Amino acid sequence: MLLSSFLACAAIEPGTPAADPDSHVIVVGAGAAGLTAARALHDAGVSVEVIEARDRIGGRTWTAGVGPAAVDLGASWVHGTEENPMADFADAHGLAYIPDETRWKTLYDETVGKALGDAEWTVADDAYDAFEAALPDLQESLGQTTVSVARDQWITDEGLTGQEARLARHAIDQWMVELEYGGPVDTTGLRYFWDEEDLAGGDQFPVGGYGGWIEAIAAGLDVSLDHPVTSITYDADDGVEVVANGETFEGTHVIVTVPVGVLRAGSIDFNPELSTDRLSALDRLDTGNLEKVALVWDEAWWDGSLEFIAAGNTGAFPEFFDMTELAGAPTMLALYGGRFARDAQADWTDTQIVDAALAVLATAYDRSIPTPTHTAVTHWTSDPYTLGGYVYLPPGATPDDIDALARPEGEVLLFAGEGTDSTYYGNVHAAVLSGLREAHRLGVDRFNIGGWESW
């Protein structure tokens, strides 16, 4: 077969690294970004191997068995189905998802010591909408400050006091900031807050968890597990050397997909050093902290999901999702983020975290809580292979900093991951898009993978 005919069949652009039969791409990280890039290259006929620090694939997507329950301890939602490459892949591969129709049955205010009614839900919902509408004016008037400053200003301007102020603060701090971005409300920048794009189609849950989706993307790939990368040497003429778990992997190119928290920590030694622009961007950016506690029982003793407003608006375990139907066993999943997550993860043991979550349930439901049969506590904040959740923008950081992380260093060192996509950062589809982007950069013109043909 003529080379030109082969390239046309393989959808590879002539004269690119993907068209060179001697190219061998090393992908660092077997999360959604790394596996996407590797799969796109592999299916186009490019030699590629993936190196993963953990003993599993998936990165910050992790469907774990918690006793009889299957629980997503990392990413849980498909945020929008239209123009979403992850949803397109799922549709093409028979991977199901269902709308998030969480039944929020209880809103409990610890300060007054009782569950609230529909009127108070409406106050919180209205505050959420009104603060969102006021954001452009607040951003213009307050400039480079934090969302907490804007929140206080808005609550004062609206004349909210007492319970109305608590409800508004909870809606802003938890629903808009700490459970959405993961960053503490007092370190989340106002200037670019709420500016990223959303996808249409509504929030969905992957049926069976994200694990099956990740396995489908990884099909056919060469993945080396238990290989944390410690150094990467790169040169346009000599290619790349990646040292992981005492082994040296050689290739022509490397795509680094580790989380921004790992790059910020300098966990990987790059030779030559990374550019000043990239290092400066990493200094300005930060990673949020969103953690989970999975609680599984033999029987469900509750009805629906719980919203909890802690005394002092501390953000202590603000949401308990009833995941029974999805998990396959009676399961509640507590989410907590921001400042409370940072403090709890720094100071508390797993037992203390579980006990504190159960104490919230006992308070909110005014009853003795049965001992769970199985529990799981996440540690994304301290996990050496994440060192936080997903990227967010403190004051002084801009989307340009995320764009800086997306640019290659020279010709052979490339980067991907949700923290390199300034349009959709913080989402699984951002990670997938970044992986496809780097496959394109190496010369794969069109993908021949179900669902990704048009991407």
Image (spheres, rainbow, N blue to C red):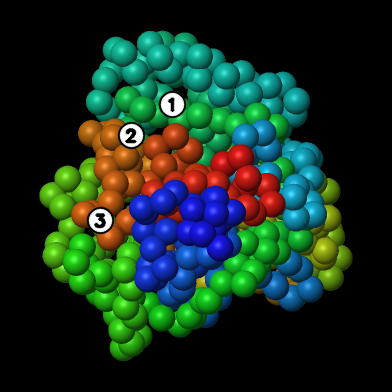
Query: What secondary structure is found at the residue carrying circle 1?
Result: loop
Residue beneath the point at 25% across and 26% down: 144
Q: Is residue 364 left or right of residue 73?
A: right
- What residue occupies the far right of the structure in this picture? 299
| Pointer 1 residue | 195
Residue 3 to residue 288: above or below = below
Residue beneath the point at 39% across and 37% down: 422
Q: Quadrant of residue 116?
A: top right
Q: Gap between marks 3 and 2, in whole Å?
A: 23 Å
Residue beneath the point at 68% across and 38% down: 81
Query: What secondary structure is found at the residue carrying circle 2?
Result: helix
Q: Gap between marks 2 and 1, in whole Å?
A: 10 Å
Looking at the rendered image, the quarter that the N terminus falls into is bottom right
Nearest the eye: 323 or 444: 444
* Crowdedness near tag 2: few (<14), some (14–19) or many (≥20) residues, C-alpha within 10 Å: some
Tell me if I can see residue 354 in this picture: no
| Pointer 3 residue | 411
Residue 147 to residue 435: above or below = above
Residue 151 to residue 290: above or below = above
The mark closer to the camera, 3 or 1, is 3
Mark positioned earlier in the residue sequence (3 or 1): 1
Query: What secondary structure is found at the residue carrying circle 3?
Result: loop
The mark closer to the camera, 3 or 2, is 3
| Pointer 2 residue | 399
Q: Amino acid at mark 1?
A: Asp
- What residue occupies the far bottom of the structure in this picture? 246
Q: Is residue 284 left or right of residue 186?
A: left
Q: Is residue 256 left or right of residue 160?
A: left
